[in-house]
Amino acid sequence: MKIEGEGRLLRIFIGESDRWKGAPLHQAIVRRAREHGLAGATVLRGMEGFGAHSRVHTAKILRLSADLPIVIEIVDRPEQIDAFLPVLDEMVSEGLMTVETVRIIAYRHGREERLRGPG
């Protein structure tokens, strides 16, 4: 798959302890994104943050938090992201979701490039 040009960046801000149907929410979102054929998803675990409840979550050694901030980033074509938003609406009961227009410079599957060779 090769994607270039206008795209959308979807960011989902949730807590590490959030769950959906018994599984960690971030894992469930990544699985659903894959099932929906999205280009890819990355889960980032934050060291510290706070959200709507203004409660600080931190990874400090003296106070280990089981609910660190999680950000899931998904970049794909606008129509793919838009089609996935209703799925997330069902899954995310607390959190923040943002969408930005981005310019995709390159998204290539490395194996395809190696098989074709130069030129």
Image (cartoon, rainbow, N blue to C red):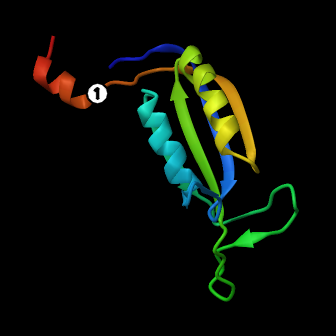
Specify whether 26 is left or right of 11: left
Residue 32 spot, x, y in % from top left = 49, 38
Quadrant showing the C terminus = top left
Q: Judge by depth and name the residue closer to the eye, 8 or 105.
A: 8
Q: Does residue 80 lie above or below 53 as drawn?
A: above
Q: Report whether 15 appears left or right of 104.
A: right
Label 1 amino acid?
His
Q: How many numbered badges does the structure rendering display?
A: 1
From the image, tell me which residue sits under label 1: 109
Mark 1 neighbour density, 10 Å: few (under 14) some (14–19) many (20 or more): few
The residue sitting at the bottom extreme is 62
Quarter residue 101 falls in: top right
Q: Position of residue 105 (x, y in %)?
A: 46, 20
Front one among 25 and 108: 25
Residue appearing at x 62%, y 61% in the figure: 46
Asked if one can make out residue 117 in the rendered structure from this viewpoint, the answer is: no
Q: Which residue is depicted at the point 72% across and 34% down?
A: 98
Residue 10 against residue 108 in the figure, above or below = below
Residue 3 appears in the rendering: yes
77 in relation to 88, above or below = above
In the image, residue 71 sits, relative to residue 23, either above or below, namely above
In the rendering, at what x and y percent does residue 62 appear? Answer: 67, 89
Query: What residue is shown at x 57% (from left), y 40% (from top)?
Result: 73
Residue at x-position 60% and y-position 29%: 9
Residue 60 in the image, given as x and y percentages of width and height: 66, 80
Where the N terminus falls, by quadrant? top left
Looking at the rendered structure, the secondary structure element under dot 1 is: loop
